[in-house]
């Protein structure tokens, strides 16, 4: 008898949560203080502060989550529903976080420009939130630019460069599922072609295809034979550990998107294979981090550029050393970001409900003939 698989794989949520925390840690340490304090850039912390790898893990996880329902049910309506829900699912929390950014900018509570000289990051902090905030530019950014014409110069979310990739990768997967249908061979042919094209033209799309491959593997009987015992632990820890080792040893050179995507594939595959890793990533703490993962990603740049940068300026004026400033501000950034993400999480819950409601409304009002053909 095969083990029963839950409809929601909470360990994937947990992994996403830890990846989001890694991104915050990376920005609060490596990026914020790494130029003025090179000793803070500890490459052997490996997965704990590899922000580029964590972002690629997001994309692999999206590839799994967006395809697993169809692979389990073979119902084309699930693809239609997810495609219809995708834009509002992302746009509602992005618009809300961007509006908070707008209010902070209008109130003069963004201090990143003033903190540039203290941490010597004109090439990073100096690029954020330098535009004049207007309601029109916020609305345009939230509804269109963030997904289809992103520019850091007009952004109301400094780290939202991932959103165009998330949107494009999602619809690459939806198109593949609809075009290949239920035939495994056709799906793998599409996946191979998409992967090859992505590696040549836009490597950051490749992790979505890796996620599709993992989701396909997870629905196969072969997965059940190896992922629920000692063999799964061995293979999983080898895959996960190899990615951690590569991240640490080649931190300064592996950040090419192609290699980073492959390492993210190894991280996620390791968790999918190993019962022990799955158990850790579906623990209470991991699931809580998963619950706030998207809010944490959205909101932490606002904490960093307001509270954290104000603290840097204030402490610098009071003649604190840079080492002492980093020792206080980095944990402050992380803890305040976690609190803000938790407070923001109801907005994401609303976005999920709204996106599902929108998709269901469109499908209900579609012509009955179209609905019958889409459902086979």
Image (cartoon, rainbow, N blue to C red):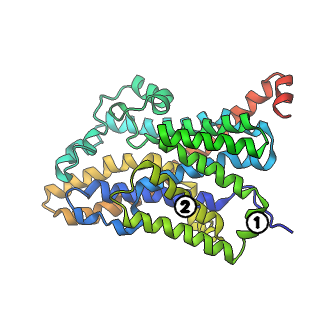
Q: Position of residue 75 (x, y in %)?
A: 80, 41
Camera-side residue: 241 or 311? 241
Provide residue 18's location: percent of width, then percent of height. 51, 61
Tell me: 154 left or right of 21: left
Label for residue 214? none
Q: Residues within 10 Å of mark 1 (few under 14, many from 20)?
A: some
Residue 171's place in the image compared with 343, above or below, is above
Density class for disc 2 (Cα within 10 Å; few <14, some 14-19, many ≥20) is many
Q: Residue at x 64, y 43 (%)?
A: 191
In front of the other: 318 or 20: 20
Residue 94 visible in the picture:
no
Q: Secondary structure at mark 1?
A: helix
> Would you name the residue on which mark 2 appears?
266
247 up-or-down from 127: above or below: below
The numbered mark, 2 or 1, whose residue comes first in the sequence reads: 1
The residue depicted at 59 percent of the width and 52 percent of the height is 61
Q: Is residue 111 left or right of residue 182?
A: left
Q: From mark 2 to mark 1, how far is it between C-alphas?
A: 19 Å
Is 299 located above or below residue 285 in the figure? above
Q: The residue tagged with tag 2: helix, strand or loop?
A: helix
Residue 356, quarter of the rendered image:
top right
Q: Is residue 98 visible?
A: yes
Q: Image quadrant for the C terminus?
A: top right
| Rendered location of residue 180, percent (x, y) | 73, 37
Residue 111, horizontal then vertical, whole percent: 26, 44
Residue at mark 1: 224
């Amino acid at each position: 008898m095969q083990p029963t698989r839950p409809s929601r794989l909470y360990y994937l949520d947990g992994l996403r949560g830890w990846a989001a925390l890694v991104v915050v840690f990376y920005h609060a340490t490596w990026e914020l203080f790494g130029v003025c304090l090179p000793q803070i850039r500890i490459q052997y912390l490996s997965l704990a502060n590899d922000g580029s790898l964590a972002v690629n893990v997001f994309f692999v996880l999206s590839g799994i989550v967006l395809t697993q329902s169809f692979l389990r049910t073979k119902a084309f309506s699930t693809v239609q529903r997810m495609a219809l829900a995708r834009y509002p699912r992302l746009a509602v929390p992005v618009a809300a976080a961007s509006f908070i950014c707008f209010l902070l900018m209008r109130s003069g509570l963004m201090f990143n420009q003033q903190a540039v000289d203290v941490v010597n990051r004109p090439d990073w902090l100096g690029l954020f939130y330098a535009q004049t905030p207007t309601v029109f530019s916020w609305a345009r950014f939230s509804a269109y630019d963030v997904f289809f014409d992103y520019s850091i110069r007009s952004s109301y979310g400094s780290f939202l460069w991932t959103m165009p990739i998330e949107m494009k990768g999602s619809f690459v997967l939806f198109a593949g599922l609809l075009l290949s249908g239920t035939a495994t061979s056709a799906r793998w042919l599409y996946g191979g072609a998409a992967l090859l094209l992505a590696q040549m033209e836009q490597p950051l799309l490749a992790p979505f295809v890796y996620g599709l491959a993992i989701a396909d593997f997870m629905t196969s009987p072969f997965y059940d034979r190896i992922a629920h015992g000692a063999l799964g632990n061995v293979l999983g820890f080898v895959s996960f550990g190899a990615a951690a080792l590569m991240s640490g040893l080649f931190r300064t050179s592996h950040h090419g998107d192609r290699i980073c995507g492959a390492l993210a594939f190894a991280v996620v595959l390791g968790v999918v294979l190993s019962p022990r890793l799955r158990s850790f990533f579906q623990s209470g703490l991991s699931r809580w981090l998963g619950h706030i993962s998207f809010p944490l990603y959205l909101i932490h740049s606002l904490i960093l550029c307001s509270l954290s940068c104000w603290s840097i300026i204030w402490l610098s004026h009071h003649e604190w050393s840079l080492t002492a400033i980093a020792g206080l501000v980095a944990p402050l950034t992380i803890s305040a970001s976690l609190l803000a993400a938790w407070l923001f999480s109801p907005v994401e819950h609303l976005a999920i409900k709204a996106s599902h409601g929108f998709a269901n409304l469109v499908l209900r009002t579609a012509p009955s003939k179209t609905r019958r053909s889409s459902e086979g």
